[in-house]
Amino acid sequence: MKILIAEDETAIAEIICYNLQSEGFEADYAEDGAALLKKFNDEGADLLILDVMMPVKDGLETLKEVRQTSKVPVIMLTAKTSEQDRIAGLESGADDYVVKPFSMGELIARVKANLRRQGYENEEEDSDIVEGADLIIDGAKYEVLKRGEVVELTLREFELLKFLASDPGTVYSREELLEQVWGYEYYGDIRTVDVTVRRLREKIEDDGKDFRYILTKRGVGYYFGG
């Protein structure tokens, strides 16, 4: 499994690469987003780690370009602690983020969790197919069809939809969804769930109509209506 890192601080990039390689990953880095995109287009990768603040092309710009052609898992690194900065990354299609300063153990755990969700480390193929009205969710292909047309979702959007759809009518709190779908303990940023739900609704719900699939139980959380 290959991981590419975009980080303009060489010492940090080299430490990340060393630790990833120690865990058995192939890892390489670029010092800005433009160089990262060239490596990614030329060589491919199973996961990207993007620093937000970089010269030439920053992490958010790089992420937006990646998302035009790829669903590869993306983890953002940011020194910013503002909630709005983290939300901007999620709205641009990031799957996860780690705030600097971070422990290398935390970053490695996030890398492994995102790769598991992508299916690289699954021992058994998930072949579940969930159907709800005009929506078909294919767990084996990581594909969603709406009225026969493929809906382009990020990994996290797909996982959230699949999790809710697997148990229609059951209401899950934001904290439960963070734990079950994101795979890490709740750190206080429940807006992560709200942003992903909003992006998901924009893609699977009909414009100008009441929500049909992802519904809100006021004061409690979200559930799948089907």
Image (cartoon, helix red, strand yellow):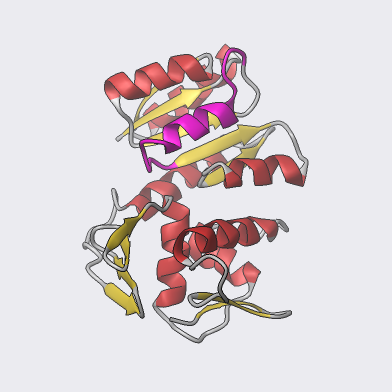
In which quadrant is the N terminus drawn? top left
The residue lying toward the viewer, choosing from 4 and 72, is 72
The residue lying toward the viewer, choosing from 63 and 181, is 63
Magenta stretch: residue 68 in it? yes
The residue lying toward the viewer, choosing from 72 and 21, is 72
| Tally of numbered tags | 0
State the image quarter where residue 196 is shown.
bottom right
Region rendered in magenta: 55-73
Residue at the spot 49% in from the left edge and 68% down from the top edge: 206
Can you see residue 180?
Answer: yes
In which quadrant is the C terminus drawn? bottom left
Magenta stretch: residue 166 in it? no
Among all residues in the image, which is located at the extreme bottom? 169
State the image quarter where residue 3 is shown.
top left
Residue at the spot 50% in from the left edge and 46% down from the top edge: 110
Rendering coords of residue 26 (x, y %): 33, 27
Rendering coords of residue 127 (x, y %): 22, 68
Q: In the rendered view, tell whether residue 113 sits above or below residue 9.
A: below
Decide if residue 187 is on the left or right side of residue 56.
Answer: right
Rendering coords of residue 39 (x, y %): 36, 18
Residue at the spot 28% in from the left edge and 48% down from the top edge: 120
Can you see residue 29?
Answer: no
Rendering coords of residue 89 (x, y %): 61, 41
Q: In the rendered view, tell whether residue 22 sits above or below residue 147.
A: above
Decide if residue 181 is on the left or right side of residue 142.
Answer: right
The residue lying toward the viewer, choosing from 224 and 3, is 224
Among all residues in the image, which is located at the extreme right? 82
